[in-house]
């Protein structure tokens, strides 16, 4: 994750903002409050003052010395997860005892090769990847090295370069087998074929790829192999790069995951996936890496595919059909990534459902890496709150997060910074006492403090340290602006927590001038006009900049209607306008893409939606339910941006539709932002 540079410390210390809504009011306010620091050797903990008044915030600088790390950080006995060198404690209402334990950042690893080789011990950085595990060799030419394990004879956990290093000193055991014991021709090859292939951006500058795929049986030595250039066969090639996969049993099948690093920019690669132990490999994929210095970015946004078992055997799924139509007009080679807003399948624990969903994506996987977002369907396993379902399907870099909390991350690509949140990681889905570390909001439905503080640090660090970023996009499954709940009171909260999240997040998003918020909670699609959120908790609609009332920005294929003559249609496809707005100080746009597949229309309450639209006149730039002339439509959005302009368009796809051009593709509406 990102580190907040120490050069920002002075700025942070100089800012002391009071968030009164996050403090418990009381008649008699004690104070000022004392700040006490207890820290072990190996680093330095500093705060700008030794006393603080009620309701103020304070920035704490925690800097390990060379060769040390922060092993434990507590405030008043509560363990705190710190991202970077600075932690901000909000809305202080009592004395603070800050306790920090520094420890060596390295651990020692011994290598046991069962007498076949001699390898020296090595030091590795705790919590990082192993990255440079040695290759064990044997004098016996019949021995085949199968990798490193935490126990002898291939037992325990399989350890590869992208495995995280534990704290304790430990031994890794080499596993050798006779090459004559493995014969792929005698195996049921179908059980070793890859499925549910997913490719993600694995690091913050989107240059490394996280690859994950599943097999029905445990592979002997799963690998991802790649070469420069376009090849149709790996036979006879000598310069093959190979990355060993970490294999993990999901109890129903096997997940294999690897990271492709150090790829050269603007270079074509050919990739194959398989088992080096049994010499069984799948097909070959081709892709070209991004330019080193990008000045534009393009991506697709889809959600709520809710794949079932139906149709996956022949790839004839709603997700596959929608993606095929989308890539007919916005080709995968031109798209930098695909955002999926969550709810991938209707049964997250069923491997065949995921196989069906990913079957329509595998041909685009390397050309258009997926930016996965945790939905409701991926968060629960037999009513148990866990991230394991999502973690089983994707390989993302989230080292400090657990099976209960986390799975939020970010990356930069050219002029855009993308922050992905987990809206399930909130108080109403956990015990309330898990959120007493001082977040802005302590009510039901808001994000837990660890994620909220991460988001603020992520946006602030990018704002001050990456001048190439011009646009800030936040993605989450839960929508903050559902039309049916946009202005209703607490009794209309129903099964969602949009109101609590809105109260909490819009303040932060406004403060850090986020441009676009993408969500995917319900079946309808909407785009708001630019909005801000003031200190009184009121939504403000920003005026159109540089335009006359009713004026639209048109392109030859965009179907636009003058807003003065448009009529809202709550149960039909509705085009309002394509308006140009000034971004930044002028507010942020909220956009939700509709569901994919038949039967996935909106389930909002029309009466509440109508009253809220009337109450908040002008919030929504367009609103569609996904039904056109009685036929349900899948939806997708395209987002294109450069250093000055962001253009968002939303389209519909019927499952039996044939579209020869963008002119015949149902167009729902769009919005354009200018810097």
Image (cartoon, rainbow, N blue to C red):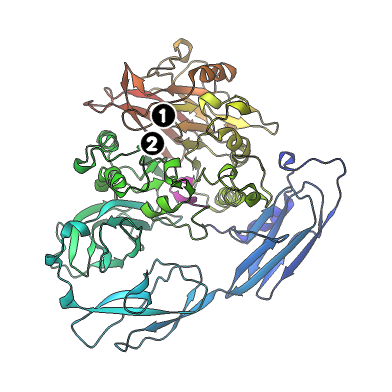
- Confirm whether the magenta stretch covers residue 258: no
- Where does residue 198 sit, x and y in percent of width and height? 32, 51
- Where does residue 391 sit, x and y in percent of width and height? 41, 54
Q: Residue furthest front?
A: 382
Residue at position x 28%, y 44% in the image: 361
Residue at position x 52%, y 16% in the image: 549
Residue under numbered circle 2: 304
The residue segment tinted magenta is 406-419
Q: Is residue 125 above or below residue 446?
A: below
Q: Are marks 1 and 2 in contact (CB under 8 Å)?
A: yes
Closer to the camera, 558 or 41? 41
Residue under numbered circle 1: 523
Residue at position x 58%, y 26% in the image: 492
Magenta-colored segment: predominant secondary structure: strand
Tell me where residue 181 sits by quadrant.
Answer: bottom left
Closer to the camera, 640 or 609? 609
- Confirm whether the magenta stretch covers residue 410: yes
- Where does residue 375 sit, x and y in percent of width and height? 44, 42
Residue 230 in sight here:
no
Mark 2, secondary structure of its residue: loop
Q: Is residue 166 above or below residue 138?
A: above
Q: Is residue 550 above or below residue 213?
A: above
Q: What whole-number distance in Å separates the C-alpha atoms at marks 1 and 2?
A: 8 Å
Left or right of 639: which side holds 36? right
Mark 1, secondary structure of its residue: loop
Q: Residues within 10 Å of mark 1 (few under 14, many from 20)?
A: many
- Where does residue 412 sit, x and y in percent of width and height? 46, 50
């Amino acid at each position: 994750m990102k580190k907040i540079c120490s050069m920002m410390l002075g700025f942070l210390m100089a800012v002391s903002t009071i968030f009164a809504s996050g403090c418990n009011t009381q008649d008699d306010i004690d104070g000022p409050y004392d700040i006490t620091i207890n820290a072990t050797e190996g680093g330095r903990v500093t705060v700008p003052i030794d006393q603080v008044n009620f309701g103020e915030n304070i920035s704490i600088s925690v800097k390990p010395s060379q060769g040390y790390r922060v092993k434990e950080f507590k405030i008043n006995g509560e363990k705190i997860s710190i991202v970077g060198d600075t932690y901000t404690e909000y809305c202080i209402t009592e004395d603070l005892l800050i306790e920090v334990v520094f420890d060596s950042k390295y651990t020692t690893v011994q290598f046991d090769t069962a007498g076949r080789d001699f390898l020296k011990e090595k030091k590795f950085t705790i919590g990082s990847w192993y990255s440079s595990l040695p290759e064990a060799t044997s004098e016996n030419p019949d021995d085949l090295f199968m990798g490193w394990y935490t126990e002898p004879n291939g037992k325990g956990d399989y350890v590869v370069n992208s495995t995280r290093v534990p704290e304790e000193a430990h031994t890794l055991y080499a596993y050798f087998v006779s090459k004559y014991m493995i014969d792929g021709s005698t195996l049921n090859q179908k059980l070793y074929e890859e499925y549910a292939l997913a490719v993600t951006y694995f690091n913050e500058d989107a240059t490394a790829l996280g690859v994950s795929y599943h097999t029905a049986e445990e592979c002997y030595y799963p690998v991802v192999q790649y070469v420069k250039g376009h090849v149709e066969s790996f036979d006879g090639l000598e310069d093959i790069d190979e990355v060993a996969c970490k294999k993990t049993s999901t109890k129903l099948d096997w997940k294999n995951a690897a990271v492709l690093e150090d790829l050269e920019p603007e270079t074509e690669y050919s990739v194959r996936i398989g088992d080096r132990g049994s010499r069984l490999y799948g097909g070959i994929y081709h892709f070209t890496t991004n330019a080193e210095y990008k000045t534009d970015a393009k991506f697709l946004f889809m959600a709520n595919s809710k794949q079932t078992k139906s149709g996956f055997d022949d790839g004839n799924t709603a997700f596959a059909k929608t993606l095929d139509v989308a890539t007919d007009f916005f080709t995968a080679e031109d798209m930098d990534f695909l955002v999926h807003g969550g709810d991938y399948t209707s049964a997250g624990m069923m491997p065949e459902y995921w196989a069906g969903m990913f079957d329509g994506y595998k041909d685009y996987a390397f050309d258009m890496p997926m930016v996965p977002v945790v939905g409701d369907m991926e968060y629960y396993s037999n009513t148990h709150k866990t991230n394991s379902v999502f973690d089983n399907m994707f390989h993302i870099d989230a080292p400090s997060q657990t099976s209960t909390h986390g799975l939020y991350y970010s990356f930069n690509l050219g002029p855009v910074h993308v922050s992905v949140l987990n809206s399930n990681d909130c108080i109403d889905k956990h015990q309330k006492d898990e959120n007493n570390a001082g977040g802005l909001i302590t009510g039901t439905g808001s994000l837990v403090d660890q994620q909220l503080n991460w988001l603020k640090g992520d946006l602030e660090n990018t704002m001050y340290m990456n001048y190439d970023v011009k646009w800030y996009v936040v993605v989450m499954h839960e929508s903050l602006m559902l039309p049916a709940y946009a202005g209703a009171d607490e009794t209309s909260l129903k099964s969602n927590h949009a109101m609590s999240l809105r109260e909490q997040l819009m303040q932060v998003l406004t403060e850090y001038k986020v441009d676009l918020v993408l969500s995917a909670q319900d079946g309808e699609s909407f785009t708001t006009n630019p909005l801000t959120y003031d200190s009184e908790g009121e939504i403000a609609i920003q005026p159109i900049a540089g335009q006359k009332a009713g004026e639209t920005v048109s392109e030859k294929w965009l179907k636009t209607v003058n807003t003065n003559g448009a009529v809202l249609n709550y149960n039909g496809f509705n085009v309002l306008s394509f308006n140009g707005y000034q971004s930044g100080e002028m507010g942020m746009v909220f956009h939700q893409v509709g569901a994919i597949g038949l039967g996935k229309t909106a389930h909002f309450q029309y009466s509440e939606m109508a009253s809220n639209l009337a109450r908040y006149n002008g919030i929504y730039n367009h609103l569609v339910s996904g039904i056109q002339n009685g036929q349900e439509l899948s939806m997708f959005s395209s987002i294109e941006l450069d250093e000055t302009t962001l253009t968002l368009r939303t389209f519909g796809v019927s499952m039996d539709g044939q579209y020869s051009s963008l002119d015949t593709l149902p167009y729902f509406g769009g919005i354009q932002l200018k810097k």
